[in-house]
């Protein structure tokens, strides 16, 4: 019994170290990317993204609707549980994307910025993309495998940061920020 507690404690400490490293390195890298983008883009580009950030943030919290936490906390899960969570999450994210796609002109009218229609429609794709990883992230968290999560998070942050800077250098403006997400 003591051996199991020691193994779990060791796994938890390693998880804490990897999780902390993940947070620190990702935030530092995002800060460096933000500084570079501040020199390459105009404030209007950041403003357009900020207008849509609220819509995307609310949408992502609606789509997650507790599935990830439920998958992490439930003691006994079957493959059917994972499959059901994946399917329901993917379907709800697709439905929400459809709603955002159709209502994009309403948001653009609200802000009196017609250029927000294509921006929101493309940016909202992140809702569907994130739905594909929900079950996998929950499984890795459940297994206290923060090393893999940290590697995945940093890799995606690195790729999106580099792509964003390259697109900003090429003059894509707000679209470079859209690609970052």
Image: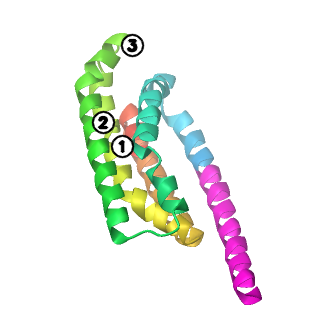
C-alpha separation, residue under disc 3 versus residue under disc 1: 22 Å
Determine whether 113 is above or below 19 in the image. above
Q: Secondary structure at mark 2?
A: helix
Q: Which residue is mark 3?
A: 111
**Which residue position is annotated with label 1?**
127
Look at 53% across and 67% down and name the residue there.
75
Tell me which segment is drawn in magenta.
Answer: 1-29
**Picture quarter with the C terminus:** top left
* Residue 49 visible in the displayed image: no
Magenta highlight on residue 179: no
Left or right side of 46 for 176 = left
- Choose the circle earlier in sequence order: 3 or 1: 3
Locate residue 78, reporting x and y percent. 38, 70
* Colour pattern: rainbow
Q: Circles 1 and 2: CB distance less than 8 Å?
A: yes
Q: Residue at x 47, y 61 (%)?
A: 137
In front here: 68 or 19? 68
Label 1 sits on a secondary structure element that is: helix
Compare marks 2 and 3 and give the one earlier in the sequence: 2
């Amino acid at each position: 019994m003591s051996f199991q507690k020691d193994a779990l404690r060791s796994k938890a400490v390693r998880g804490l170290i990897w999780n902390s490293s993940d947070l620190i390195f990702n935030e530092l890298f995002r800060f460096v990317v933000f500084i570079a983008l501040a020199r390459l883009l105009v404030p209007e580009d950041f403003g357009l993204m900020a207008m849509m950030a609220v819509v995307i943030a609310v949408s992502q919290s609606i789509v997650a609707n507790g599935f990830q936490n439920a998958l992490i906390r439930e003691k006994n899960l079957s493959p059917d549980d994972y499959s059901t969570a994946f399917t329901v999450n993917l379907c709800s994210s697709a439905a929400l994307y459809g709603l955002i796609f159709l209502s994009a002109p309403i948001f653009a009218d609200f802000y009196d910025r017609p250029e927000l229609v294509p921006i929101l429609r493309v940016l909202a794709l992140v809702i569907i993309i994130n739905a594909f990883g929900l079950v996998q992230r929950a499984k890795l968290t459940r297994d206290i495998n923060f090393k893999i999560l940290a590697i995945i998070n940093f890799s995606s942050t690195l790729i999106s940061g580099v792509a964003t800077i390259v697109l900003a250098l090429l003059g894509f403006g707000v679209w470079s920020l859209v690609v970052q997400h």
